[in-house]
Amino acid sequence: MSSPAKAKPATAPMVFTANRLRDGRVVWLAGAGAWAETIAEAHVFPPAEAAAGQALAQAGERAQQVVGAYGVEVALQAGRPEPVKFRERLRVQGPSVDAEPPAYRLAS
């Protein structure tokens, strides 16, 4: 039996992201455990406080607000968090497919 994966300590500022359970949208952990739809509203945790951010994100999962919460390393650009990795930069832009497919009518 293998041991659980150990989280590496944070070395950069972090924000936390997840998918909202109600509709699957990407959300970002804001202050006091609230979830926001834009990364600009996300609370940026310094590396020393990343564990506290992870605990808040996990509390959101336990409260069944979100699913799949995880930390994202960011760089601050003009005071705003910008994800370091491509995957999260793509998540910031929103869904890559239309969430509401167009209505189709059958030809008669």
Image: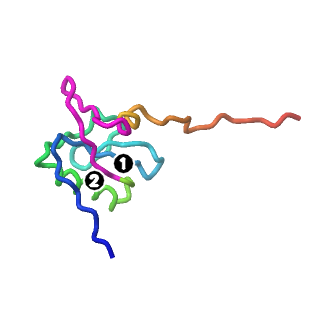
Count of labels shown?
2
Tell me where residue 83 appears, x and y as whole percent: 29, 35
Q: Earlier in the sequence, mark 1 or mark 2?
A: 1
Instruction: Check disc 1 and report the residue beneath it.
Output: 18
Name the image quarter holding residue 55: bottom left
Real-space Cα distance between discs 1 and 2? 8 Å
Q: Check residue 91 in the rendering and tell me which mark sits there, or answer none.
A: none
What's under tag 2, amino acid-wise? Ala
Q: Is residue 104 above or below residue 8?
A: above
Q: Tell me the tag on residue 57.
A: 2
User: Range of the magenta residues?
Assistant: 69-88
Q: Residue at x 23, y 29 (%)?
A: 80
Q: Is 37 placed left or right of 98 in the picture? A: left
Is 85 inside the magenta-drawn segment?
Answer: yes
**x 28%, y 58%: residue:** 58
CB atoms of marks 1 and 2 within 8 Å = yes
Q: What secondary structure is marked by label 2? A: helix
Image quadrant for the N terminus?
bottom left
What secondary structure is the magenta-colored segment mainly?
strand
Q: Residues within 10 Å of mark 2 (few under 14, many from 20)?
A: many
